[in-house]
Image: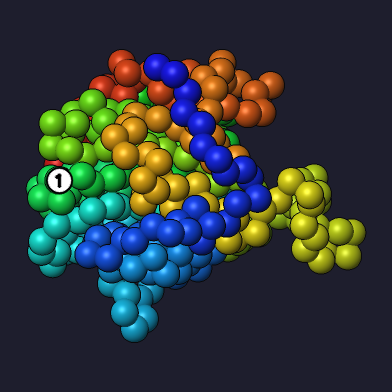
């Protein structure tokens, strides 16, 4: 499969992605759309005419409640939806919780929120996506997927030692695998599925990181003030790749792909600690995608 390119780059904003694009009549759900790059994703899509539903844990006016770590909340959201969905942007997430935390059903919280809740949402709304005729599923993953494959033997760290970054990494690998599996299963329904990494952006996602980690990333000075390295993006730029996959006509029909924060399709590379760019082979492995899909079907059916 030839890698796709676009005329955009890492500094392109979400609004620039949609310049001249009319999304009138298209209904789009953005999880975690109340802040950070989710908010900028919503603004750009609405600016192009889309009807956008913001799904968030703590809704305010014009938003709808959705706690991805609670399958009861996900099912209530699905039950309350009617009519077609033209795109779902799985943007909500948590990162690098310093200690192992679990959802009410015992799932490790990052996997529950970043992956399993989104899986339940996507599969619950499959018929609504099919009704759209040309729907798109967009998984907001991370460059962290390069760090660890999905651990089928102990996904919730019940036996292996908990590691904040390994837990985050496997949840983001799972997001890419979800897109790969959905692309293969839902093509006949006109549904495409792709994943992306947005790049480095100052948002609430970093709220669990300690000062030493932030300084090591060049994102904080010795006095504890946030600084913005050259390789960081603004939230408006960080939302660009999500918007590209959700609504740009350049991606009509594209499916099962992973785009980097420069708005180009990523190269498949070996994963591991030395990997700094691209998408890990384990994140796009069809066999792993099929296995994960079956795992998630069973897990969400039993809770």
At label 1, counting other C-alpha atoms closer than 10 Å, the crowd grade (few under 14, some 14-19, many 20 or more) is some
Residue 97 visible in the snapshot: no
Q: Position of residue 198 (x, y in %)?
A: 55, 46
- Number of callouts: 1
Front-lying residue, 113 or 82: 82
Q: What is the quadrant of the N terminus in the image?
A: top left
Q: Report the residue marked by disc 1.
A: 133
Residue 21 visible in the snapshot: yes
Name, please, the residue furthest toward the right: 222
4 relative to 71 in the view: left or right: right
Task: Name the residue located 60 percent from the left edge and 51 percent from the top edge.
Answer: 12
Applied colour scheme: rainbow
Give SS at disc 1. loop
Task: Name the residue located 14 percent from the left edge and 64 percent from the top edge.
Answer: 81
282 relative to 165 in the view: left or right: left
**Location of residue 14 with respect to 302 vertically, above or below:** below
114 relative to 199 in the view: left or right: left
Q: Position of residue 64 (x, y in %)?
A: 28, 72
């Amino acid at each position: 499969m030839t890698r796709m390119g676009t005329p955009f780059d890492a500094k392109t904003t979400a609004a620039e992605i949609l310049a001249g694009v009319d999304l009138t009549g298209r209904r789009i759900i953005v999880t975690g759309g109340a802040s950070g790059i989710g908010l900028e994703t919503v603004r750009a899509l609405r600016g192009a005419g889309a009807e956008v539903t913001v799904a968030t844990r703590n809704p305010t006016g014009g938003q709808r409640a959705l706690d991805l770590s609670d399958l009861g909340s996900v099912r209530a959201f699905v039950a309350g939806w009617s009519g077609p969905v033209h795109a779902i942007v799985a943007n909500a997430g948590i990162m690098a919780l310093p200690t192992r935390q679990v959802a009410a059903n015992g799932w490790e919280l990052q996997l529950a929120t970043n992956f399993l809740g989104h899986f339940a949402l996507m599969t619950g709304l499959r018929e609504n996506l099919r009704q759209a005729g040309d729907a798109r599923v967009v998984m907001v993953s991370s460059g962290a997927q390069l760090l660890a494959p999905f651990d089928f033997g102990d996904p919730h760290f019940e036996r292996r030692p908990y590691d904040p970054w390994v837990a985050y990494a496997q949840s983001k690998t799972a997001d890419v695998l979800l897109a790969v599996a959905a692309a293969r299963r839902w093509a006949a329904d006109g549904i495409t599925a792709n994943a992306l990494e947005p790049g480095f952006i100052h948002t609430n996602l970093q709220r669990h990181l300690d000062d030493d980690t932030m300084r090591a990333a060049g994102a904080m000075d010795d006095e504890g003030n946030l600084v913005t390295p050259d390789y960081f993006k603004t939230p408006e730029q960080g939302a660009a790749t999500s918007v590209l996959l959700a609504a740009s006509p350049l991606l009509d029909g594209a499916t099962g792909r992973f785009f980097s924060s420069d708005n180009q399709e990523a190269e498949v590379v070996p994963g591991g600690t030395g990997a700094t760019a691209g998408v890990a082979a384990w994140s796009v492995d069809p066999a792993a995608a099929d296995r994960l899909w079956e795992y998630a079907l069973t897990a969400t059916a039993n809770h």
